[in-house]
Amino acid sequence: MTDTVLMNTARNSKAWPFQEAQRLAKRLRGGKQSGEPVLFETGYGPSGLPHIGTFQEVLRTTLVRRAYEALTGQETRLIAFSDDMDGLRKVPDNVPNKEMLAEHLGKPLSRIPNPFGTEYDSFAAHNNAMLRAFLDRFGFEYEFVSSSDRYNGGAFDGALRNVLRNFDAIQDIMLPTLGEERRKTYSPVMPVSPINGEVLQVPIEVVDAEVGTIRFTDADGGVVEQSALGGMAKCQWKVDWAMRWVELDVDYEMYGKDLTDSGVQSGKIARVLGGNKPEGLIYELFLDAKGEKISKSKGNGLSIDEWLQYGSEDSLGFYIFANPKSAKQMHAGVIPKAIDDYWQFRDRLAEQPLDKQLGNPVWHLARANERIDGPHAPGAGENLSVPYSLLLNLVSVLGLEATPENLAEYVASYTGEPVEDPSLIGLIECAVNYNRDFVAPTLAKRAPTGGEVAALTELDAQLAAATQPVDAETLQTMVYEIGKREDFGFESLRDWFRALYETLLGSEQGPRMGSFIALYGVEPTRKLITEALAKA
C-alpha cells in the first residue's frame, strides 16, 4: 500500500478520527504557514494523579493526530501540558501528609513540598513523573511541557506582556460571565505574593505592560508593585489556556463537555491576543453504572488500574474509541464485552479492504501505538483462541478456588496446545480476578423444573454416550437438537439455553454451550447436571 492510496482512502473515511483530521486539514489548507509540524495539545492538572480521563484525552488526541498524518503525510507533534504553576485550592482526598499540604494552600503546585516521600522535590514534580510514566506505559509519543518551567524560565514573558497589553479587552470578555462577588476579585493575571508565596486572586493594576510591571494589594493589606514576569505571576486558567494556544501555536485540542463555555471564552481571548482557537472536538463525559457523572471525589468511577485488573489495555482503548460525542458508562460490567468485541474486530482487520480497515477501531489503536506494520501488527499473529466471556464462564464454574494455572490447563486441553500467547495468559489472570470480585458473589443456581428436568436428563445421557473426544460444534448441535424437541415443552430455544445457564452456571446469560462443554469437559459438565437434577 502506498501513501497515496492511504491518503485517498482517508479522504473519504467516515471514522471519527478521520472526520476530525479532515476538518483540521481543511482549516490548515496544506499545512502550517510557518512550515512547523502541526501541533496537538492535551492538558493536565497535577493537583491529582493521572486517571482514566487523562488517558482517554491523550488517546483520542493521538488517534486524531495519527489520522491527520495518514491523511496528509505531514509531520505532527503532541504536547502534554502540565499546569503545575496553578495554586493548590484544596487538599486532595487520596494523598498522604494532608496536614502538610494544608499549610501550603494557594501556592503553586511546583513550589509545594512532595507529600509522597519519593525522590521528587515537589508535589507537582511527583505527579508529573506519574503522568509521564502513565503515558509511557501505554506507548504514547509526546513532548512533556511544564507550565512552571515556562513561567519561571521566562519563556512565557512575551505572552504575559501581550496579556497585559490587552488587559481591558480580556476583562470585557470575562467579567460579564462572573457573579457579582467574583467580579470584585477577578484579574486575568494572578500575582505571586512576595510575602507568603501564594497565587493571589486579587485585582491588579497594569503599571507598564511592556516592562511587565503590575500593582496589587498583598495578603497583609500592603500595596505591592512588582514584575509579573519570570514566575512572579500566572494567568487565570481560561486566560492561560488562550495564551498557550497563541504562544505555542496549537492547532488542535479537544476537551470535555463540561468545559464548553470555557472554550468559548478562551477562544474569544485567543483572538484578542492575536491568535485563534484551535480546531478540536468536545467530548461527552464518563458515567457510572447509575448513569451519574464520574467524580474523583465520589470515587464512583473505574480507575485505569481497576480496569487493568480485569481487562487488557487494548480493550480499554477499544471501549473508549467509540463515538466520543456519546456519554459512556465506565464500570466493571462493560469490561467483558469490550474485550471480546476488541478481538472480534481484530480478527476481521487482516481480511478487510483498506476502506473498511480505516473504520475499524483496531486499525486506529494499532497506529496510535505504531503497531500497524510488522510481526506484532493486529492480524499478523494468531487470534485469541478462547473468548474472554467463555473464560469467565469456566472460572465461575470452577469457583473461588480457580487459579490462572488450572484455568490455563483447561484451555490447553481445549485447544490442544500449551498456553503461551501473552494476551491469553493476561486475560486468564484477568478472568480469575473478575470472577472473584464480580461474578462469584452474584451466582445463584436454581433448581430445574418441569420439562427442564427431562431435557437435562437427556443431555446427560447423550453426553455419556458420545464418543470421546467430541468437538464443540458436535456438542452445540447436540444441545440445540434437545432444545427443539416438543416433548420437553420449551417455547423457544432461548428458554432452553436460559435454563442451562440458570441451573448449571447460576447466571441469566452464558456462553455458547457447545464451546463451554468442550472447554470444561464432558465429565465435569455431567457432574454439573447431576448436581442440578439433585435439586429438582
Image (spheres, helix red, strand yellow):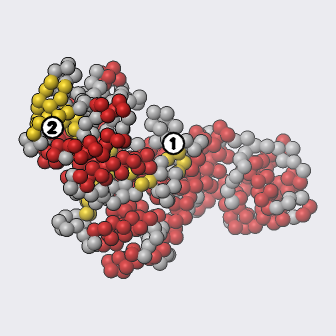
Q: Residue 31's quadrant in the figure?
A: bottom left
Foreground: 33 or 181?
Answer: 181
Crowding at mark 1 (Cα within 10 Å: few <14, some 14-19, many 20+): some
Quadrant location of residue 297? top left
* First along the sequence among labels 2 and 1: 2
Q: Percent from the top left, x then y, of residue 161?
A: 14, 45
Determine the residue positioned at 42% across, 61% down. Answer: 365
Label for residue 293?
1
Between residues 301 and 158, which one lies in front from this camera angle? 158
- Numbered badge on residue 206: 2
Q: Quadrant of residue 380?
A: bottom left
Q: Is residue 423 left or right of residue 368?
A: right
At label 2, the amino acid type is Val
Residue 81 appears at what percent x and percent y? 27, 47
Residue that appears at 30% across and 31% down: 184
- Name the one closer to the observer, 485 or 319: 319
- Can you say which quadrant of the picture contains the C terminus? top right
Mark 2 or mark 1, which is nearer to you? 2
Label 1 SS: loop
Q: Do we see residue 368 in this rendering?
A: no
